[in-house]
Image (cartoon, rainbow, N blue to C red):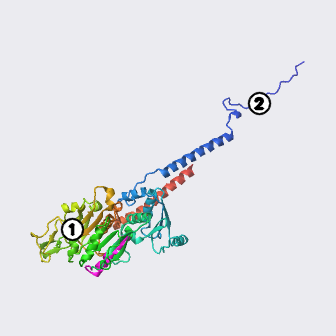
Amino acid sequence: MPDTAQTPPPQEDAPHQDATAPSASAMPRRGGIGLNVAIQIFLALALFAGVNRLNYYHYWRWDLSPSQDYTLSPATLKYLDSLSRDVQIYIVFGRDSKVYGEIQSLLEEYRNHGRQRIKVRSIDPVRDIERAEQLKADTGISLAQNGVLIRCGVNKRFITEEELVVREKGTSTNKQVTEFRGEDAISSALISVVEGRIRRFYYVVGKGSRSGEGQGDAYNAAVELGKQQNFEIFQINLSEIRYIPPDADGVLILGPRYDFSEREISMINDYWHKKRSGIFITLDPSGEMLRLNAFLTANGVRPRGDRVLCAESTSTGPKKEYTVMAEFLKEVPFTRHLSASAITFAGQSESLEIKKDSPELKEQSIAVQPLIQASPRFWGERQFLEELPVVDEEDTLPPIYIAASVERGATADETQRADSSRMVVVANSTLLDKHTMLAVSHDFVAAGVNWLLNREEFIGIPAKSRHSYRIQLTGRQHELIFWITSITLPGIVLTLGLMIWASRRAA
């Protein structure tokens, strides 16, 4: 009987398993992956924050402008490094001002080098009305014009925009800025508000001048200089007082036409022999100044009474020139920064005899130094009224000195020199005339005044010249610029965009 047992039907093979595939238990858990990513993100953020923090406190800055417009002078940097009080500086400028950008960049340099002592804030009185009104209420200053306000405790100083710049001469109402004097004015104001004392100069009046206008120009120029260098000007008439006020940090005798009396010279001499005094004198060669000249001669500077000029015979007739081209001497520290500049003296000048090696002056501890020397083609002429003067025995040959400094009580020890009396003598009365005064004349007077005040650390802060450049293009160049900027460059960008779009469509 046949076997009726049935064999089981063939079963389909089980799906093939890869022996190399990891088991489910070997796969990392989702939580571990997340933790690993979180740690990586945290470390990346920590590294980013650390690098930025190091970059914030430790960095290098370079001024790549041709004339170093954004670099502070060594004198300012030295003062900022020793600053011991907190100072607030407010930039009160409309954003449409042409010097706003320079002011902001300059004061950022003060903040960066001020060792966190200087805080700078900007207020636009047109847009930030509420903040401007609050500042007015706090300081009592009207803020009616653009300027920089510097505060240190209860002391404050507002520097107007016109004190920060020098504009071109002329009658135009839209005068262009030719020089930027921001650092000079701001550094002087800074030291004034930190010290809490404004220096005082007394301007001698009542002695006439070449003209009333010339005397007014000199006084106004002195007042403007005082605003920039932070000293006050007060007028005095020596015939109405018994002595020069004891709070005088300096005396200005600018272009007197009439001589001083014996009593007045005695007052000047008493002031000069104080432990600490300063005198700035400009001489008018046309004046008869016997007593004043005697006082100067006794201190090593003798005005000769001649005229510094040059003369020659030309095809059009005799030519006589009184306007003197001169240069600063390098040997004097407080004018050394001007030695690369030339100065012009308008009007008439007389030569000065400098008694540098006088034994009598050395016994009195008086040191005399020439400051400005005329160009070699000029000489000191006695017969200056002649149509064509020529050099003879009685005339003074080069070198011709037009300005000198005198220091009484000078010593080799720099720590003791703050107690010396100082005087600057210039043998020309037009130095501060508004029609002839040059920027270098302003810098020279500022340097002289700071030397009288024993503020040598602020001598030589340079003004920043403003340059305007004009590019003239031909019609062909205009056409080339149009095709490059309006057709070629946009066409290149459009072509690249179309190529990228086509490549993505093809993919």
How many residues crowd mark 2 within 10 Å: few (<14), some (14–19), many (20+)? few
| Magenta stretch holds residue 211 | yes
Taking the view exactly as shown, the residue that stands out farthest to the left is 393
Choose mark 2 or mark 1, whichever is in front. Answer: 1
| Magenta stretch holds residue 132 | no
Of 372 and 416, the residue lying toward us: 416
Q: CA distance from mark 2 to mark 1?
A: 132 Å
Helix, strand or loop at label 1? It is helix
55 relative to 34 in the view: left or right: left
Amino acid on which the number 1 mark rests in the picture: Ala
The numbered mark at residue 12 is 2
Where residue 115 sits: x, y (%)?
Answer: 46, 55
Q: Earlier in the sequence, mark 2 or mark 1?
A: 2
Which quadrant of the figure contains the N terminus? Answer: top right
Taking the view exactly as shown, the residue that stands out farthest to the right is 1
In the rendered image, which quarter is residue 310 located in? bottom left
Helix, strand or loop at label 2? It is loop
In the rendered image, which quarter is residue 39 located in? top right
Of 443 and 290, the residue lying toward us: 290
Which segment is the magenta one?
208-226
Where residue 363 sits: x, y (%)?
Answer: 22, 60
Can the viewer see residue 167 in this picture? no
Residue under label 1, please give it: 298
218 relative to 400 in the view: left or right: right
